[in-house]
Image (cartoon, coloured by chain):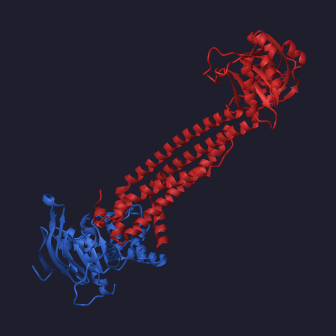
């Protein structure tokens, strides 16, 4: 009986090629879109987490103002280089402190120019940001002390300005400052926010203050805590130290911010998760649209199908046989469409993940959900019109218009 | 199903005061107003009457495609009205064949598959099924057309496929609702010769609705309907 029914259903699918293809297509699009979006979103989240882990969880950022970002108040008190020295000296378990001031500047070499991020700092910067010098050397103490016109450039800047030429020892111009390239940084690629970390020029802090910013301020400090030491403790100690240095009374709020990378990590992960949720919503809409497509096809063919059911009943088919046939047909079409959708989605995800340089993370949950949803849509819209028709007297089904 | 065993003096089909009303209240339409009819095994009955006289409705009730509003329908002394839906389906499956005016073949399906269909529901094994379908198609003169779909066949050929589908199960009765309604005279005669042959050679009881006197003349007996009632019932050749 079951084999008979499956046979009838398969025959029916073959007979109505167009209807079958459209039904399958609706399911393929729905399932495919959902799985692709969620997989890519998952990959992006995983990548963010991975990058944060590679940055190290022992990093603290000390920034002026109440909070990071556009909420900064105008009466922000900026740091001086001595604040950094105090942190290193007075707070326990600090491995390194790097002052960081930076600005976007047009760098020129010969007839090449390139807009890049110019950062004033010292050799601690390379330690804190976990970067090494591929070619050349770090700043010397005298260069740092005197504010010499020397710089260390990232791979992107080197490529843009020098191309195939020898870069070490070359002089690049940063506004009025002409400085000599003494080192090339190891390439690091994009960071979590998609910014090119190799698009950078590092010059001694003093040089930056004198020749670029024209003041003694330091925009922020990046602090690396010793391995095994508590970042929470260090964070608290730095906070107390700066409050003391700034003579803040107990009732005053902090006019600076000591941020743990974990907080930044959480923020970024939250953002990517939001993005994933958004993409999933878009995908869910496409699943819904696919479902409506299936519904339309099924409803349009309801007249023909009702007559067909009438014929089958008239020549001696049981109601349950007809229903079973339609059910099998719907299940076969839906699962077939679902499987194609899954295969296409996974292929597309692997390809897209490669293109977008995010890891491919297989999410079995969404595959199952998308498949079940599409199957449900196919079965509901394929089966229920048939259920209505099969309950009629055969002659009514035959007369149906 | 032992109760369906046939004894000679029993009518095959018996209708007692069968009525059929469509709609309710003021809009109610009385298609049948109390039909009494008896048909014996081996008969060839033509049912005639103008449009709206209830002949098709009566036919659908006889073929278990429709249910009467009131009255008794006995098939081989079984009261059809007391059967369940599945039991009536079983009756259609094993005893009744139906030919419609509009053919009602499955579209985009080959003649062979259309004829095989009732056998599939009878659980006839594939090999036997195929052989019998081919044989029946040959009987109705469609040898060589087995793989054609209804769209590729003429009206006469489609009706032959429909007849083949109705008789492939060796039914006790063949109901034909204006089988020649859509056909020209020559095709109609071919179909009627075929139907007459089935009655004469295979002993299939035939009940045929028609509004053409020529076609009714093939039958042994003519029942005339008028306004939902039997107007006359006479043996052909004897009366007139």
Q: Is residue A382 left or right of residue B38?
A: right
Residue most extreme to the front: A250
Residue A274 drawn at (x, y percent): 58, 37
Residue A266 position within the rendered picture, expressed as x and y whole percent measured from the top left: 65, 36
Quadrant the C terminus of chain A occupies: bottom left
Task: Using the image, determine if residue A28 lies above or below residue A185.
Answer: below
Residue B88 in the figure: left or right of residue A226: left
Residue A114 locus on image (x, y percent): 73, 19
The colour applied to the residues of chain A in this rendering is red
Q: Quick check: A308 above or below A101?
A: below
Left or right: A93 in relation to B185: right
Q: Quadrant of residue B94?
A: bottom left
Which of the pair A274/A60 is nearer the observer? A60
In the displayed orientation, state which residue is furthest to the bottom: B8
Identify which residue is drawn at 28% across, 88% down: B6
Q: Vertically, is A373 above or below A153? A: below
- Toward the viewer: A333 or A142? A142
* Residue at the left extreme, as displayed: B240
Number of marks drawn: 0
Q: Is residue A357 visible?
A: no
Which chain identifier belongs to the blue chain? B
Which image quadrant for residue B109?
Answer: bottom left
* Residue A44, position as x, y percentages in the image: 65, 39
Residue A383 visible? The answer is yes
Q: As displayed, is residue A236 above or below residue B223?
A: above
Residue for point 72% across, 36% down: A52
Query: In the image, B222: left or right of B188?
Result: left
Quarter assignment of residue A145 = top right
Query: Residue at the spot x=46%, y=53% of the render?
Result: A377
């Amino acid at each position: 009986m079951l084999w008979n029914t499956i046979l009838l259903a398969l025959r029916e699918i073959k007979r109505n090629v167009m209807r079958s293809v459209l039904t399958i297509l609706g399911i393929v699009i729905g399932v495919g879109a959902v799985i692709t979006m969620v997989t890519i979103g998952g990959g992006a989240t995983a990548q963010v987490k991975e990058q944060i882990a590679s940055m190290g969880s022992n990093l603290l950022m000390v920034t002026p103002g109440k909070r990071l970002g556009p909420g900064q108040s105008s009466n922000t008190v900026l740091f001086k280089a001595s604040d950094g020295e105090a942190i290193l000296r007075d707070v326990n378990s600090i491995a390194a402190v790097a002052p960081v001031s930076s600005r976007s500047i047009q760098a020129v070499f010969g007839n090449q120019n390139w807009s890049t991020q110019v950062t004033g700092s010292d050799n601690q910067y390379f330690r804190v940001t976990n970067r090494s010098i591929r070619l050349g050397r770090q700043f010397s103490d005298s260069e740092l002390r005197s504010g010499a016109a020397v710089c260390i450039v990232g791979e992107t800047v080197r490529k843009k300005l020098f191309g195939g030429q020898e870069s070490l020892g070359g002089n690049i111009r940063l506004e009025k400052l002409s400085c000599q390239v003494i080192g090339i940084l190891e390439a690091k690629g994009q960071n979590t926010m998609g910014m090119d970390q190799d698009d950078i020029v590092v010059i001694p802090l003093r040089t930056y203050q004198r020749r670029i910013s024209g003041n003694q301020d330091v925009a922020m400090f990046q602090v690396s805590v010793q391995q095994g030491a508590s970042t929470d403790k260090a964070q608290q100690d730095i906070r107390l130290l700066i409050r003391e240095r700034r003579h803040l009374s107990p009732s005053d709020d902090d006019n600076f911010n000591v941020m743990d990378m974990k907080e930044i990590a959480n923020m970024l992960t939250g953002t990517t998760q939001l993005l994933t949720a958004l993409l999933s919503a878009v995908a869910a809409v496409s699943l819904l649209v696919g479902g409506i497509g299936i519904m339309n096809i099924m409803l349009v063919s309801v007249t023909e199908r009702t007559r067909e059911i009438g014929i089958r009943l008239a020549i001696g088919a049981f109601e349950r046989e007809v229903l079973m046939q339609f059910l099998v047909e719907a299940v076969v079409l839906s699962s077939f469409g679902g499987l194609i959708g899954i295969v296409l989605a996974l292929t597309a995800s692997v390809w897209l993940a490669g293109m977008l340089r995010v890891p491919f993370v297989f999410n079995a949950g969404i595959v199952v959900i998308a498949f079940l949803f599409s199957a449900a849509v196919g079965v509901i819209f394929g089966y229920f019109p048939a259920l209505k028709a099969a309950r009629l007297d055969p002659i009514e089904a035959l007369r149906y218009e | 199903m032992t109760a369906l065993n046939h004894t000679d003096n029993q009518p095959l089909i018996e209708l007692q005061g069968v009525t059929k009303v469509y709609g309710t209240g003021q809009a109610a339409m009385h298609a049948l107003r109390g039909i009494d009819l008896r048909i014996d095994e081996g008969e060839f009955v033509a049912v005639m009457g103008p449009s709206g006289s209830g002949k098709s409705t009566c036919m659908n009730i006889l073929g278990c495609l429709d249910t009467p509003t009131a009255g008794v329908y006995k098939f081989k002394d079984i009261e059809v009205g007391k059967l369940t839906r599945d039991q009536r389906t079983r009756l259609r499956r094993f005893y009744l064949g139906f030919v419609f005016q509009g053919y009602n073949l499955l579209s985009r399906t080959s003649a062979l598959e259309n004829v095989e269909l009732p056998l599939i529901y009878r659980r006839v094994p594939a090999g036997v099924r195929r052989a019998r379908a081919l044989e029946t198609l040959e009987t109705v003169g469609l040898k060589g057309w087995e793989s054609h779909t209804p769209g590729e066949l003429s009206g006469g050929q489609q009706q032959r496929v429909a007849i083949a589908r109705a008789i492939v199960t060796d039914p006790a009765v063949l109901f034909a609702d204006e089988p020649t309604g859509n056909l020209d005279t020559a095709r109609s005669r071919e179909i009627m010769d075929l139907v007459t042959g089935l009655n004469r050679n295979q002993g299939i009881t035939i009940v045929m609705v028609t509004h053409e006197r020529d076609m009714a003349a093939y039958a042994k007996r003519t029942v005339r309907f008028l306004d939902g009632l039997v107007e006359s019932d006479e043996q052909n050749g004897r009366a007139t």
